[in-house]
Amino acid sequence: MNEIKLHYVVPEIFAQREGLSSDIWRSDIVFERGKSYLIKAVSGTGKSSLCSYMYGQRGDYRGDILFDGENISSFTTNRWCDVRQREISILFQDLKLFGELTALQNVEIKNNITNTKSLAEIVSLFEELGIVDKLHARADHMSFGQQQRVALIRALCQPYDFILLDEPISHLDDCNSDIMRDIVVREAKQRGAGIIATSIGKHMNIDYDICLSL
């Protein structure tokens, strides 16, 4: 996939609101593969909703979202499964890890489907992110910041043309935020992928191509 286009998209809950000030809602926006985007927002403006729309989890919006010119409203379940395995990856704000599984098991659930990385490559990412000692710890026994890093590794264990990062460093200190940034930029460059990151304040220090306000 080379582009994601939003044509006059607005959440249903905002549809009757007058004077909506946004660079995205009720606008024509194109996200291009290979470029990086920061979406700055305040709470309650639809940041996570936007990610859910582009990932096909929710459809409570007006307007059109097109992947390479094809409206996602026409996608079948099988098509979405293929898109989520090969074209779009996501780091959810609420992470969606399985608490009863270990950190490594959470990553392997995806990697066993996609066969993207070797075990050595996965362990190397754990080491780089400073959580190799948590490989076999249950996810619900880890801090939220540690879980964010596990969720990132999981998101990297698949092919993708775009990666969506919904407040990816909200619970990380500056040092770990920079490590995550370096990994995200490196992996996206290897794939020629686009980065779409959201923030309500703290964000990865990337030289973004475009910054938008929601």
Image (cartoon, rainbow, N blue to C red):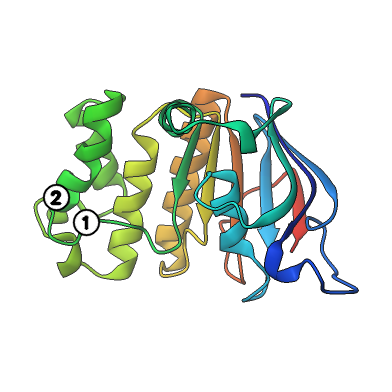
In front: 135, or 76?
76
Q: Is residue 194 left or right of residue 139?
A: right
Q: Residue at x 27, y 36 (%)?
A: 110
Say which quarter of the image contains residue 18.
bottom right
Q: Earlier in the sequence, mark 1 or mark 2?
A: 1
Neighbor class of circle 2 (other Cα within 10 Å; few <14, some 14-19, many 20+) is: some
Name the residue furthest right: 19
Question: Is residue 121 something that shows in the picture?
Answer: no
Neighbor class of circle 1 (other Cα within 10 Å; few <14, some 14-19, many 20+) is: few
Q: Is residue 134 left or right of residue 40?
A: left
**Residue 22 at x, y = what percent?**
82, 64
Asked which secondary structure carries label 2, the reply is loop
Q: Amino acid at mark 2?
A: Leu
The image quadrant where one finds the C terminus is bottom right
Q: Is residue 1 left or right of residue 166?
A: right
Q: Residue at x 48, y 55 (%)?
A: 178
Q: Are marks 1 and 2 in contact (CB under 8 Å)?
A: no
Question: Is residue 113 something that shows in the picture?
Answer: yes
The image quadrant where one finds the N terminus is top right
**Residue 125 at x, y = what percent?**
29, 41
Tag of residue 18: none
Would you place residue 195 above or below residue 75 in this image? below
In front: 77, or 187?
77
Q: Dot 2 corresponds to which residue?
A: 135
Label 1 to label 2: alpha-carbon separation: 14 Å
**Residue 88 at x, y = what percent?**
51, 35
Q: Amino acid at mark 1?
A: Phe
Q: Dot 1 corresponds to which residue?
A: 98
Q: Is residue 32 left or right of residue 191?
A: right
Q: Residue at x 12, y 60 (%)?
A: 100
**Residue 107 at x, y = what percent?**
24, 42
Q: Residue at x 62, y 63 (%)?
A: 47
